[in-house]
Amino acid sequence: MNSSSSSGGLVRRTNAAKSSSTEFSSSTSTNNDHNDNFKNGSEDENPEESSDKETRLTLMEEVLLLGLKDKEGYTSFWNDCISSGLRGCILIELGLRGRVELEKAGMRRRGLCSRKIILKSDTPTGDVLLDEALKHIKDTDPPETIQSWIEYLSGETWNPLKLRYQLKNVRERLAKNLVEKGVLTTEKQNFLLFDMTTHPLNDNNIKSKLVKKIQDAVLSKWVNDPQRIDKRMLSLIFLAHASDVLENAFAPLNDDDYDLAMRRVRELLDLDFEAEAAKPNTNEIVWAVFMAFTK
């Protein structure tokens, strides 16, 4: 897995005033809620079924929202991590919603990365991307590992027989979801040789709440025990990092808070994922996805 996330964002603070003229991504490029308290969430919770009137976002939508430039409405051309990161979000969403799980470790206690994803429930989630991925997993026999599914859904496999599993235009489809939820809007921009559909921020309040929620998770609401951190928030931190967009949430912080936030993220990245997955009331899919991006 190609990911620059394991160290790049944690060793130096990037300049928030990067030139937007050299950074853009095609609108046809391949493309949550969580509780405010930091406790384990329900593994089959469905954010779209909540009675909370607050706009509810999936992990995929939150990661994309972090990566989009507010005014320009597109992700950085140089970000080659977000595509696979969004696929990791999809797998975690399916795990948290109780649709998939890892096969049993067995007598030999196989590691997270060598165990296959198996179907737990084929009940539709109501989310088109999630249901598309769920159908692929259901129709695949024998089952495949987390690492394999991230590659298949991203279209980054050398096996031509597996290319049919690729989820196409994921970023654009997620952006349209965010438009429907009132978070983004849609515009046409001219880039000299071509026109591109972009999705600038429409509701700054929602993104501000998302950024503050992430900042609080590693600062004012930090708990020095990953098992006590809400699963969705923990997943958001890991997948935002794997997608190389976590820096965007921390950029507004002062230097001391920024350094503290990054140090605590590093503590999470350095965890023994196998040991954490073996503890009670955990979701093995979550830890297996983490391992796939950091091994």
Image: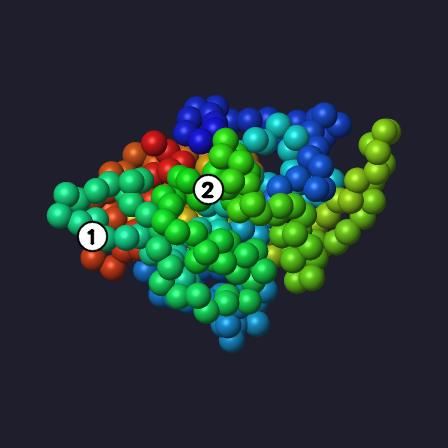
Q: Which of marks 2 and 1 is in front?
A: 2
Name the spot of residue 41 as percent of width and height, x first.
36, 62
Residue 6 visible to the viewer: yes
Tell me the residue at 53%/36% (across/down). 160
Name the spot of residue 224 as percent of width and height, x first.
27, 46
Tell me the residue at 59%/31% (across/down). 79
Q: What element carries label 2?
A: helix
Q: Which of 205 and 229 is in front in this view?
A: 229
Q: How many marks?
A: 2
Tell me the residue at 36%/63% (across/down). 120
Name the spot of residue 74 as percent of width and height, x first.
69, 40
Amino acid at the residue labelled 2: Ile
Q: Which mark is residue 12?
A: none
Q: Which mark is residue 150?
A: 2
Amino acid at the residue labelled 1: Lys
Residue for badge 1: 279
Q: Which of 120 and 17 is in front in this view?
A: 120
Position of 91 relative to 158 (above/below): below
Position of 59 relative to 153 (above/below): below
Q: Which colour scheme is used?
A: rainbow
Name the spot of residue 15 as percent of width and height, x first.
59, 26
